[in-house]
Image (cartoon, rainbow, N blue to C red):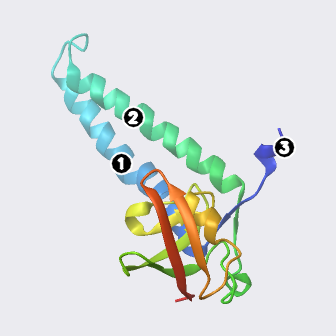
């Protein structure tokens, strides 16, 4: 599979977030789950012990996420900060957009799909807004159709 060897690009911050999550899962979360399992085992009969089942399920999910992060990190590469354009939107760009209808401004960081988090204003380059603004320059107006409807944005600023 060619996709397995494909490098996944991360910003420095994105790579650090992933490494921090891995470390937390291997130490803190694994320790908490081990303690839950120990407490559940102490209750006796495991056949009808929902706490034990929940802890085993949490353990399996945590181990799966650890393996997923390790696999991502094997194929990860950090974007050189100097390569992030300040004049054209690209992966790693921080961009301020103004909704042309509401005049509300919002800042996004353009990241890969594995690092996207809309609640932290990190959008994927593959999202509808990400696709619409990649390669665009300051003062351009773009139209985007998302699941929430059609929007018109003006690119106010590229960079911090």
Residue nearer the viewer, 11 or 135: 135
Give the quarter of the image for residue 110. Answer: bottom right
Element class at badge 1: helix
Image point (52%, 45%), residue name: 66
Element class at badge 2: helix
- Examine the rendering and report whether any part of residue 15 can be seen: no
Image point (39%, 34%), residue name: 59
Residue 47, given in percent of the width and then of the height, sits at: 25, 10
Observer-side mark, 3 or 1, equals 3
Using the image, determine if residue 49 lies above or below residue 67: above
Q: How many marks?
A: 3
Q: Outermost residue, left direction?
A: 43
Could you classify mark 3 by the number of other residues whose Cα lies within 10 Å: few (under 14), some (14-19), or many (20 or more)? Answer: few
Residue with the mark numbered 1 = 29
Residue 90, given in percent of the width and then of the height, sits at: 68, 75
Q: Earlier in the sequence, mark 1 or mark 2?
A: 1
Q: Earlier in the sequence, mark 2 or mark 3?
A: 3
- Examine the rendering and report whether any part of residue 42 can be seen: yes
Using the image, determine if residue 101 lies above or below residue 37: below
Mark pair 3, 1: CA separation: 33 Å
Could you classify mark 2 by the number of other residues whose Cα lies within 10 Å: few (under 14), some (14-19), or many (20 or more)? Answer: some
Any mark on residue 59, and which?
A: 2
Any mark on residue 56, and which?
A: none
Residue with the mark numbered 3 = 2
Give left or right: position of 84 versus 108: right
Residue nearer the viewer, 134 or 43: 134
């Amino acid at each position: 599979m060619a996709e397995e060897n494909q490098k996944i690009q991360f910003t420095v911050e994105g790579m650090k977030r992933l490494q921090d999550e891995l470390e937390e899962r291997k130490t803190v979360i694994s320790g908490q789950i081990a303690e839950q399992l120990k407490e559940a085992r102490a209750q006796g009969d495991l056949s009808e012990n929902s706490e034990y089942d929940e802890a085993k399920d949490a353990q399996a999910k945590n181990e799966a996420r650890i393996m997923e992060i390790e696999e991502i990190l094997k194929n990860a590469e950090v974007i050189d900060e100097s390569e992030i354009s300040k004049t054209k939107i690209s992966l790693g760009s921080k961009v301020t957009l103004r909704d042309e209808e509401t005049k509300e401004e919002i800042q996004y960081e353009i990241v890969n799909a594995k690092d996207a988090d809309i609640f932290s204003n990190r959008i994927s380059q593959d999202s509808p807004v990400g696709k619409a603004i990649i390669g665009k320059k300051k003062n351009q107006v773009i139209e985007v159709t998302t699941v929430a409807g059609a929007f018109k944005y003006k690119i106010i600023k590229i960079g911090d």
